[in-house]
């Protein structure tokens, strides 16, 4: 299984792509899954599940959290 574990959507300041666009592009490139890790933001699980089904690609949730010593990627948290 090939998964990109660090994707930012337009919910972060450093990306213009919607989650739909990321899913489409990732599927076209042969990825089996993606993890959306927007900065200080937790995406809606229901929305991610709907997009996952729509494009037949596994989508995991995560977030990139700012700390005093840098950024930390977290996975599986809801808030």
Image (cartoon, rainbow, N blue to C red):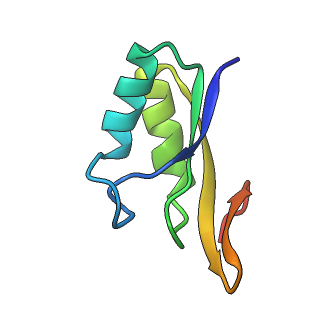
- On the rendered structure, is 32 left or right of 44? right
Q: Quadrant of residue 4?
A: top right
The x, y position of residue 66, in whole percent, is: 61, 77
Residue at the farthest left position: 16
Q: Quadrant of residue 76?
A: bottom right
Q: Residue at x 53, y 39 (%)?
A: 49
Relative height, residue 41 to residue 23 (above, below): below
In the picture, which quadrant includes the C terminus? bottom right
Relative height, residue 53 to residue 73 (above, below): above
In the picture, which quadrant includes the N terminus? top right
The x, y position of residue 32, in whole percent, is: 59, 19
Residue at the farthest bottom position: 68
The x, y position of residue 6, in whole percent, is: 57, 46
Relative height, residue 37 to residue 55 (above, below): below
Q: Residue at x 29, y 46 (%)?
A: 17
Marks counted in the figure total: 0
- On the rendered structure, is 74 left or right of 24? right
Q: Residue at x 43, y 16 (%)?
A: 29
The x, y position of residue 45, in whole percent, is: 56, 52
Q: Quadrant of residue 20?
A: top left
Q: Residue at x 33, y 54 (%)?
A: 15
């Amino acid at each position: 299984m090939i998964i990109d574990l660090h994707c930012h959507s337009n919910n972060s300041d450093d990306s213009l792509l919607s989650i739909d666009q990321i899913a489409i592009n990732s599927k076209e490139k042969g990825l089996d899954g993606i993890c959306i890790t927007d900065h200080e933001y937790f995406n809606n699980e229901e929305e991610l599940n709907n997009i996952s089904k729509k494009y037949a690609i596994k989508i995991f949730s995560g977030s990139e959290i700012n700390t005093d010593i840098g950024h930390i990627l977290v996975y599986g948290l809801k808030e």
